[in-house]
Image (cartoon, rainbow, N blue to C red):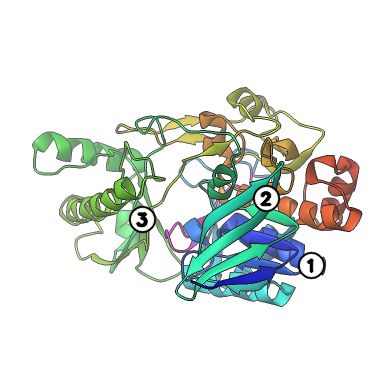
Amino acid sequence: MTTIKKNVDVLVLGGGAAGVCAAISAARSGLKVLLVESQGCLGGSRTATGVDTFYGFYTPKQQQRIVGGIPWELAQQLLNANAAFERRNTYGAGTGITYDVELLKVVYENAVLTAGAELLYHTYASLVHQSEGNITNVVLANKQGLTEVTAKIYVDTTGDGDIAARAGAPFEKCDANELQSLSTIFFLANIDVETARTISHAELSGKMKAANRSGDYVLPREEGSWHVTPHSGIIQANMVRVSGIDATDPYALTLAEVEGRKQTQEYVRFLKDCVPGFENGSLIGTSHYIGVRETRRITGEYQLTEEDVIAGRRFDDGIACCGAPIEDHRAGADTRWVYVQGDGYYHIPFRSLLPQGIDNLIVAGRCLSATHSAQASARNSAQCMAMGQAAGTAAALSIAHGKAIRQLPMILLLNKLRSQDVIL
């Protein structure tokens, strides 16, 4: 098989929230950027998984906005188009920005292409070659065959840390039974929203517990949430829980997809039978693929800890602010919530994006260097986008100044981020 060869300045692998912002920020610096995504749209969890809400822009209790830059620019586009709205105090996570999923796909694509980056869908990074602490090339696979891409800087925004792992960078991963559970998001139409809103979250949880005790239903998660969308009578529900799955195992992930859709049918039956306002509801869609919260976490120059999160710790190399609570969707019927103390937010340090042992690689998103519980806070969408902007900006500065990423003077990176309206 003939292998095509391609050269770029920055290769961004993974087109989720982090990858989009990494590609935009690097391309706006005039670099040749290629963004590779395995699916047929950008956004990852924000679109194909159906999450439909940006969390993390605001601190939950103080309602202070702590994320700006490219993430806020993209959110503003949706708000200005009347395709999004702010939801206050959403299920303990603070104000969320709920948007039209289909429009976000287009907003992301327009932003990436307008910035000058090249976009490639339906493509996987099948091989990563490295030598003496540097990635030398990444081999992409798609229907055309193989393409060997050589870049100056590689950005791993795969979520699972695939590129870092294949390059030999160290990482951590919990036992499958300790990993955060997976969820299949689903959408229902023809809901009497006003009636449904009369049932509190506590009452809904009580109805789930009673349904399980009756033996008529099997509901693995006795909580979960639903919310309105920009479309009248259509709601999004996050209730499914598939535990004990290592999503880097494709066989296990396949069974999780099957189980997620099976659970969706059971939760829909429960809602229609037992919850006022849902009687005439119709299932109109499930997420294109099951939502994954946690797999590999790289071992970086610094590991963010639960203590850092709770204490609201600041770092000299802080490149993003996060006020999201620890939201640990552990196995079992409930979820563990722990809130940031003090003024409600902490810093994500740049060092947590730098894998040990690989000099021309940076990560962004949920595979950052963090403990299991700290990652359960830092994985929120606004923070993933902010990490992506920092990664793309660092890549551009590294190339411009001829320095390895980890050798960048922090004042140079922080000043550049501030000039891009990033809140630090």
Q: Which residue is mark 2?
A: 135
Q: Which of the 4 image quarters holds residue 320? A: top right
Dominant secondary structure, magenta: loop
Q: Amino acid at mark 2?
A: Ile
Q: Secondary structure at mark 2?
A: strand
Q: Which residues are magenta?
A: 47-58
Residue 329 or residue 72, whichever sits in front: 329
Above or below residue 299? Residue 11 is below
Q: Is residue 174 above or below residue 88?
A: above
Neighbours of disc 3 within 10 Å: few (<14), some (14-19), many (20+): many
Residue 399 point in image, percent of width and height: 84, 57
Residue 167 included in the magenta stretch of the image:
no
N-term mark: 2 or 1 = 1
Tell me if I can see residue 65 in this picture. no
Q: Is residue 249 left or right of residue 309?
A: left
User: Which residue is painted at 66% across and 26% down in the image?
Assistant: 308
Residue at the spot 59% in from the left edge and 33% down from the top edge: 370
Residue wearing tag 1: 31
Q: Amino acid at mark 3?
A: Ile
Question: Residue sitting at 48 percent across and 36 percent down?
Answer: 327
In the foreground, 77 or 249? 249
Residue 185: assigned label? 3
